[in-house]
Amino acid sequence: TESIRELYITNRYLKVNITICKARSLDQSAISHVWYSQVANEQHEDTALGVKCFCKLHFGVPILRAEDSQFKEWYDSLFKNNFSYEQKLQAMIHIPITSIMTKPQLSAYLEAMQKHYVTIGISLEFPKE
């Protein structure tokens, strides 16, 4: 691929297309945090932070690996075979997963949470509009 400098030297101008993606809503982020607390309160096995780490690892990482080749390469090279399950869970405290997701990705994440937790008797509901 040509560098920006080479394109400018060749063409004497640059045409730049910028695509602005509407950021996900605060509501989506708020829902996930309410659900982490709900699961922790109903399950009595972990804290809200522990539930968040579990969800990020089990639902968020697979979504990002499937849709973002750079994330997949980064995650696989650093984490996939180099850390134990417990270490990966602990790392989720520090690694942005949901905060880098698009609206559709975060929707898929929330739906994955719902599907998982309903199997153990926890119903996660979207708030009524």
Image (cartoon, helix red, strand yellow):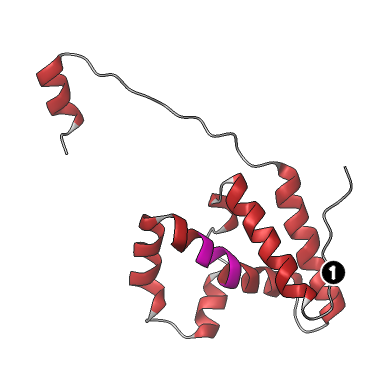
Residue occupying image coordinates x 59% and y 56%:
98
- Residue 129: x, y in percent? 87, 42
- Residue 101: x, y in percent? 56, 51
Residue occupying image coordinates x 63% and y 57%:
108
Q: Secondary structure at mark 1?
A: loop
59 or 45: which is nearer to us? 59
Asked whether residue 95 appears in the rendered view, the answer is no
Work out whether 94 lies above or below 81.
above
In magenta stretch: residue 61: yes
* Left or right placement of residue 26 versus residue 100 in this view: right
What's drawn in magenta, residue-wise? 58-63
User: Residue 34 is drawn in which quadrant?
Assistant: bottom right
Q: Residues within 10 Å of mark 1 (few under 14, many from 20)?
A: some
Residue occupying image coordinates x 17% and y 33%:
3
* Left or right placement of residue 18 versus residue 129 in this view: left
Residue at the spot of label 1: 123
Work out whether 47 lies above or below 20.
below
Q: Quadrant of the N terminus?
A: top left
